[in-house]
Image (cartoon, rainbow, N blue to C red):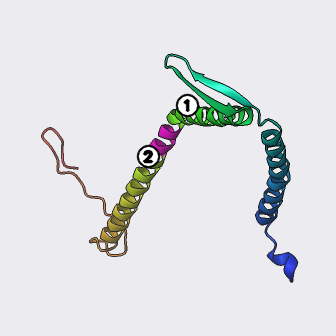
Amino acid sequence: MRGPAAKRNPDTAVKKFLRHFSWILTLPLFVIVGTFAVANMGSVALDFWPFDFTYPIPVSFLILGSVFAGFLIGGLVTWASAGRQRRRARDARNRIANLERELQILRGEKALAEAKAATAPGGRGETVLLQRPNGPGQSAA
């Protein structure tokens, strides 16, 4: 396949679609929030109970601030609850790195052993079997 069709990457097309899709969802949400804020500019008294302090605030700021605070608290709770999975992933990455280092060491030892076997008395990499000396009680045959 030649031409522009050969250069298309399906992942890029999906990312481009998702980018446009997110804007399709985000823009109406901004319009709704803005309309809500403008429509609810009435003032309410925010009372900090144990203290003798009252602060007038627009209803929309109070509601949107509460939603934003809930969003932050939910994000923190989600982040904290995923701590175990992050630790397990970190441990797995460390274990993989250790095993890869060990594999490289073993490959080096294997190459060294093969090089020694190639220069052994047999000369052509043949395995030379050494006989054990006869111990007490064994007869020489």
Question: Mark 1 belongs to which amino acid?
Answer: Ser
Q: How crowded is mark 2: few (under 14 residues within 10 Å), some or many (20 or more)?
A: few
Q: How crowded is mark 1: few (under 14 residues within 10 Å), some or many (20 or more)?
A: few
Residue 126 falls left or right of residue 62: left
Taking the magenta stretch, the answer to whether it contains residue 88 is yes
Depth check: give the residue in front, 136 or 84: 84
Residue 47 visible (yes or no): yes
- Residue 81: which numbered mark, if any? 1
Q: Residue at x 31, y 63 (%)?
A: 128
- Of tags 1 and 2, which is closer to the observer? 1
Q: Residue at x 15, y 43 (%)?
A: 135
Q: Is mark 2 on a helix, strand or loop?
A: helix
Q: Which residue is drawn at 47% across and 38% down?
A: 87
State the extent of the magenta-drawn residues as a range.
Answer: 86-92
Report the residue marked by disc 2: 95
- Residue 105: which numbered mark, if any? none
Question: Mark 2 belongs to which amino acid?
Answer: Arg
Q: Residue at the far left: name it.
A: 136
- Residue 109: give x, y in percent of width and height: 34, 62
- Residue 126: give x, y in percent of width and height: 37, 68
CA–CA distance between discs 1 and 2? Answer: 23 Å
Residue 89 falls left or right of residue 45: left
Q: Residue at x 50, y 16 (%)?
A: 50
Tell me the quarter of the picture where residue 17 sits: bottom right
Q: Residue at the far bottom: name it.
A: 3
Residue 30 falls left or right of residue 54: right
